[in-house]
Amino acid sequence: MTEDLILFGGGGHCRSCIDVIEEEGRYRIAGIVDVAEKVNQSVLGYTIIGTDGDLDRLIKEYRYFLVTIGQIESADVRIEKFQLLNRLGASLPVVISPCAHVSRHSVIGEGTIIMHNVVVNAGAKIGRNCIINTGAIIEHDVVIGDHCHISTAAVVNGGTIIGAKTFLGSNSSTKQYIEVGEGSLINSGISVRRNLPPGSKIYQGK
């Protein structure tokens, strides 16, 4: 049975999420929540039906919600919306592209989306409200904290621990069995080969 799903955030990342949700086929998108000036606009044919202020009403009509706001510099907005939905009693499903391989021996937290062509290997544990973006590889026994964005074509090698609220940029990689501290930002194309303390920011060429 297909369940109705409300998306929270109608920007570019939402478009990618819509494609995954349509392909997975478990949920029917019933509408999108965004800012007031976008109400009644549409994203790929789905109408923006309300704002944060309408959530009390929408929660009574719909069970399932997904945060579809992107994350680069900071996870704060995604965390705020995720926590708001939790407080209101929404269910935040795991969404997995049928084009991804997710091991039956892995664990995926609520509200996380696994995009097209991702590989999640055995023993991996991915937290809540994460984006595992197109083509990323999450190797065996990796631990990824809540509210992380592992970006397109990033590779997290075996046994690595990624702290909560971390952004790992496109085509970046980690050496196996290292730890990246909470709230770190790793720019695209960076190879991380050592442990990083919380709040680390590593940009191209540094």
Image (spheres, helix red, strand yellow):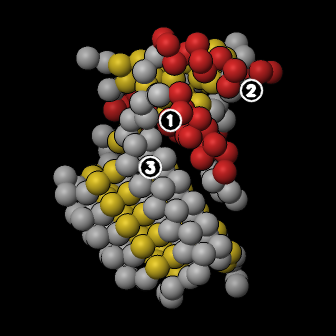
Report the front residue among 81 and 158: 81
Residue at image mark 2: 35
Q: Secondary structure at mark 1?
A: helix
Of 92 and 188, the residue lying toward us: 92
Q: Secondary structure at mark 2?
A: loop
Residue 162's label in the rendered image is: none
Res. 76 in view: yes
Q: Residue at x 39, y 35 (%)?
A: 93
Q: Is residue 41 visible?
A: no
- Mark nearer the viewer, 3 or 1: 1
Left or right of 30? Residue 39 is: right
The answer to which of marks 3 and 2 sits earlier in the sequence is 2
Structural distance between the alpha carbons of marks 3 and 2: 24 Å
Please state the horizontal and vertical placement of residue 27, each as a whole percent of the image: 37, 24
Task: State the SS at label 3.
Answer: loop
- The residue to which callout 3 is attached is 128
Residue type (three-letter) at the residue carrying disc 1: Asn
Residue at the image position 64 percent from the left and 30 percent from the top: 10
Which residue: 46% across, 16% down?
62
